[in-house]
Amino acid sequence: MNETPSRKEQTHDRILKTASRAIRRKGYGGIGVADIMKEAGLTHGGFYAHFASKTDLLAEVADRTGADSLGRLGRIADAAPEGEALAAIVDAYLSDQHVESPETGCPVAALGSELARQEPPVRRAATRRMKEVIDLLGRQLPGWAAGDDRGQALATYCTLVGALTIARAVDDPALSRAVRDAARDLILAPRD
């Protein structure tokens, strides 16, 4: 049975895709509903046929972008040779392409400092997806199955997000690269 999305579902998806890119590019406060709808090629009034409020949109965006990020990292891990999944994830996350493309990359690195000021539904969706990424990272660590590497998984995630945030913030390409190299070395250093 062919389950072709309805026109309304397609439009809803278009709004989410547009909002996901625009919000990561400009920040939560840098773009309004009217701007998102215009960028999606729709009228402002049509927004309320899809979302009850901007908060509802932002919560869906947090969920969607988190799911997309998780999926991307999962595919990288799955494609890596055995024992090299963590290194593959780290290299992709800290890549030049990821630094230069905040609108399509990790939503936490693009918006993390703004999340604390968002409404509970937005924070809840983002938190759930962050936990899933932390679990994915943890599964790449040798002691995860025994419950030993939860702290290491958390530290790995924080190091990745922090390094990418700083690498994007600085205007010195050499410093941007040095920050990412230091983070990679720290994460992938042999453990005793």
Image: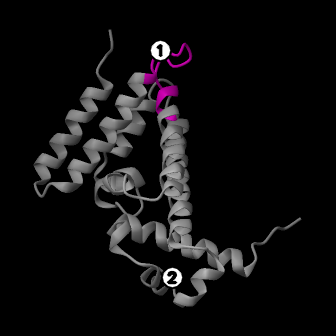
Q: State the scheme by which the image is colored.
A: one colour
Residue at the far top in the pictured view = 192
Residue 172 in which image quadrant: bottom left
Residue 137 visible in the shown view: yes
Q: Which mark is residue 148?
A: 1
User: Residue drawn 60% across and 87% down?
Assistant: 46
Characterize the local packing of mark 1: few (<14), some (14-19) or many (20 or more) Cα atoms within 10 angstroms. few
Residue 171 in which image quadrant: bottom left
Amino acid of disc 2:
Ala
The answer to whether 70 is drawn above or below residue 182 in the figure is below
Amino acid of disc 1:
Asp
Q: Which mark is residue 171?
A: none
User: Residue drawn 47% across and 35% down?
Assistant: 134
Dominant SS type (magenta): loop
Report helix, strand or loop for mark 1: loop
Report helix, strand or loop for mark 2: loop
User: Residue drawn 55% across and 55% down?
Assistant: 63
Quick one: label 1 or label 2, which is nearer the N terminus?
Answer: 2
Residue 153 in which image quadrant: top left
> Where is residue 155 shown, x and y percent of the image?
35, 29
Q: Nearer the viewer, residue 74 or 19?
A: 19
Which residue position holds label 2?
40
> Where is residue 119 shown, x and y percent of the image?
47, 59
The answer to whether 104 is drawn above or below residue 81 in the figure is below
The answer to whether 166 is drawn above or below residue 104 in the figure is above
Quadrant holding the C terminus: top left
Q: Which residues are magenta?
A: 136-150
Characterize the local packing of mark 2: few (<14), some (14-19) or many (20 or more) Cα atoms within 10 angstroms. some
Answer left or right for 96 relative to 142. left
Quadrant holding the N terminus: bottom right
